[in-house]
Amino acid sequence: MLISPDEIQKSISMYNWKYTNNKIHKSYSFKTYIEGVDFINRIVEIAERNNHHPDIFLTWCKVEISITSHDLGGVTTKCINLAASIDNIIN
């Protein structure tokens, strides 16, 4: 089930994610390229375990993540939970 934009904002604000175009997104910076790759590999494990897969873009020392429910066309509780799990990798 999709959640409202207000509920999305409340849920993601503590994690510094942004909500636009029916997606939540965030960028992470790293000291080295390989740290970004390692981060992505950890995200992949979580995504597979939860059967919910973010869009991931890797550049030099930066990883950009976008999360949406492709089936429902917006953000669900599952998206918010995935975002929180991704943040927990760093913390």
Image: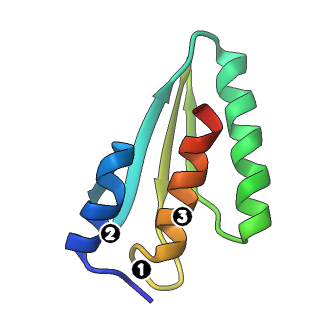
- Three-letter amino acid code at disc 2? Asn
- Along the viewing direction, whichever of 20 and 85 lies nearer the viewer: 85
Say whether residue 45 is visible: yes
Of callouts 1 and 3, which one flags the residue occurring earlier in the amino acid sequence?
A: 1
Place of residue 66 in the rendered image (x, y in percent of width and height, measured from the top left): 47, 53
Camera-side residue of 68 and 83:
83
Asked whether the beta carbons under mark 1 and mark 2 sit within 8 Å of each other, the answer is yes
Residue at image x 54%, y 43%?
87
> Mark on residue 22?
2
Q: How would you rate the neighbour count of disc 1 (Cα within 10 Å): few for under 14, some for 14-19, many for 20 or more?
A: few
Disc 1 designates what residue? 73
Q: Is residue 57 left or right of residue 12?
A: right
Q: Earlier in the sequence, mark 3 or mark 2?
A: 2
Q: Secondary structure at mark 2?
A: loop
Q: Residue at x 52, y 53 (%)?
A: 84
Is residue 62 positioned above or below 69 on the image? Answer: above
Q: Name the residue carrying label 3.
A: 81
